Amino acid sequence: MNPTFAPDRADDRLMMTTTRKTATKKTGNGPRGVGRGMRSVSAPTPTLADSFMLALREDHARLSRVLWLIDELAVHLRTDPEATQPVLLEAMRYLLAYQHTWHHPREDRLFARINARDSRHRADLRALMREHRAGLRAVEALVQGLDRASAAKLRRAEGTRLARSFTKYVGHLREHMRHEERVFYASAESVLNAADWRALAADAVPNDPLADSAQLTREYPALARHLALSVRTLSSDGRARVDLHPKPSRDRATRLVELYGELLHDGFDLMRESVHSAGSLRNPLDLWRVAAPIFVRSGTFAMRCVTQPAHFAQETLQEVAEAARSAWRPASGKR
Amino acid sequence: MANWQTTTANLFARLTVKQLFRRELSVENMRAQVAAIERVFPRHPPGFEITHDHPLPHCDAEWISKKDSPTDRVLLHFPGGAYVIRLPNQERAMLARLCHFANARGRLVCYRLAPENPYPAGLEDCVGAYRQLLDLGIAPDRIVLTGISAGGALVLATLLALRDGGVPLPAGAIAMSPVADLTDSAEGSRTANATRDSVLSRELGESIRELYVGGNAARLRHPYVSPVFGKFDGLPPLLLQVGSDELLLDDSQRCGERARAAGVAADVEIWDDVPHGWQCMPFLKESDRALEHCADFIRVCSP
């Protein structure tokens, strides 16, 4: 088991990416310095590269957690703007304050060094750095748009437009992150030398607020509260409700579909069996032996096709009548 | 309210798969029918390499990796299929998409099926597959277990068995609509969603549970068979995904509650109106979204 991971609190969930890395095969270099204040790797050791890359990967882990939440919330923007807007705003402000201000510039410095040592990926590296700048502009525009929009506006087309923009941004950032991990993280460790890693590690980076539960609660209270939720309901239109209460009309429609589905399958089975039986006919004298069971089964099936829907209709009418009677009874009681 | 693709998928599933599972079919017939459905899915996901290195002693297993994409994350995947059938093409395609989203390699374990090999054969294969990864030198915190339906239950059972055996646990686990309670209690979502579930039926549940435990009903409450009765202490972070209309909704919710009560970080995602196994249906918008969420979870567990 993982001895450093504890529990049922968002704080701990958020902390896990920084506390549980002690014995990875790839990064078996002890825990990263994640104390309060500024963070930097002090001494050039053989594992400096691992520490630096682990720090970037952990940034990605926390970024993933926030993207997960933004993707979930964006669909609720139009249906429940009062609850969604503040959390989304805090999530985006976090991205601006940490990921775009510290994480991306750090990656840019890494990419510049890879570029200097190995020019094979020049075009891709430039594209990634361009995406960092474009991402920053996109977040700023989203924060501005969301901040200005009233709840009433968000319930209309503005909410739909912003929700789409959020989803698009999340999609871009995920793809960007995958691209970085797939290609450049893998090549960085083989291309750069100790001097490069020393220079990269010397740059101080502040703590990620998501790695410090107290700081997160202080600076982003709505985000912290939402990250602490353990059960989430998701839908394509933001109207999801888990409701196990009977829904008579919907359940009736479903039963009708299944009734016809069953008849359809029985019809296919009957047809298949009949064709099979007819195929076994070798002698005209056998005709009656083969045809009789087909006639009987077909007749029974035809009867079912008539009686079962009729029975269903009768049941439905009874249910509707019963519902109408029980709706009428309290009203007549009042009189 | 679901979108039109999901509504169509539900209708199609209700008219085909649910009807199929409800009929009195032998396991052989069911496997033959499922094999016909399998032809819809490509055998080889484009852009991925499939290799059969490191065979397991009792069952097939394969590696699925994206070409030119080095990574040290491994997703150990247990497919679904009610313990008696298997849709390898569909599962392979889903695992390939998840590997792409999470930037990981996949290990698909085709554990032994009932009724030929009842419990505990399948579970032993899953535990063995995980131990093999450790023997190959893969660090536990680079491994995430994933599974769907019966495979989801095996994910939870494997975690319980590994913890009980003192084996280092993986970084996290994802159970998609796990069949976590084979006692099939007649309450909650098992009855309320009996009509609404477009894929599973209670009739199917009754027949498979007998087959899985080899007729030994006393085993149904064992935590390795019905993980919802297990103690979740010390397990790694869990993500449970389930549809709001599924018969199995309560299984995920109860596992989530038990895990959180035991101090485990467990997220439960309830997706509105989706059919059972929607993660395997790439034509649904919710499928990619759900897998992206899984990928986010994987990155959080195993940075």
Image: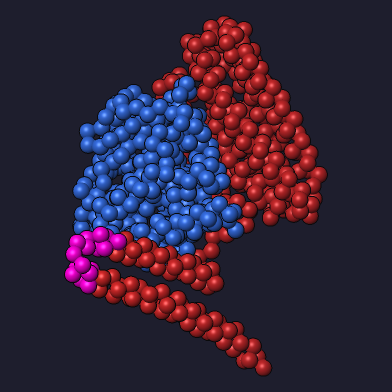
Chain colours: A red, B blue
Residue in view at x 40 percent, y 46 percent: B148
Residue B74 appears at what percent x and percent y? 41, 30
Q: Which sits in the foreground, B113 or A317?
A: A317
> In the image, A206: left or right of B23?
right
Q: Position of residue B5 (x, y in %)?
A: 56, 52
Q: Is residue A280 magenta?
A: yes
Q: Quarter holding the N terminus of chain A? A: top left
Report whether residue A291 is seen.
yes
Q: Which residues are magenta?
A: A275-290
Q: Classify residue A141 as left or right of residue B301.
A: right
Q: Is residue A98 above or below residue B259?
A: above
Q: Nearer the viewer, residue A253 or B200?
A: A253
Q: Is residue B70 above or below residue A172?
A: above
Instruction: Tell me if I can see residue B173 in this picture.
Output: no
Q: Nearer the viewer, residue A150 or B1?
A: B1
Residue at (75% x, 30% y) in the render = A137
Image spot of residue B144 (x, y percent) = 42, 35
Quadrant holding the C terminus of chain A: bottom right
Q: Residue at x 28, y 41 (%)?
A: B111
Please determine whether, in this image, residue B13 is positioned above or below residue A70: below
Q: Residue at x 25, y 63 (%)?
A: A277
Snapshot quadrant of residue A267: bottom left
Q: How many numbered marks does the figure carry?
A: 0
Q: Can you name the residue that lies furthest to the bottom here?
A: A335
* Residue B179: percent from left, percent from top: 37, 53
**In the image: residue A145, left or right of residue B7:** right
- The answer to whether A141 appears left or right of B172 in the picture is right
Residue A118 sits in which quadrant?
Answer: top right
Residue B60 included in the magenta stretch of the image: no
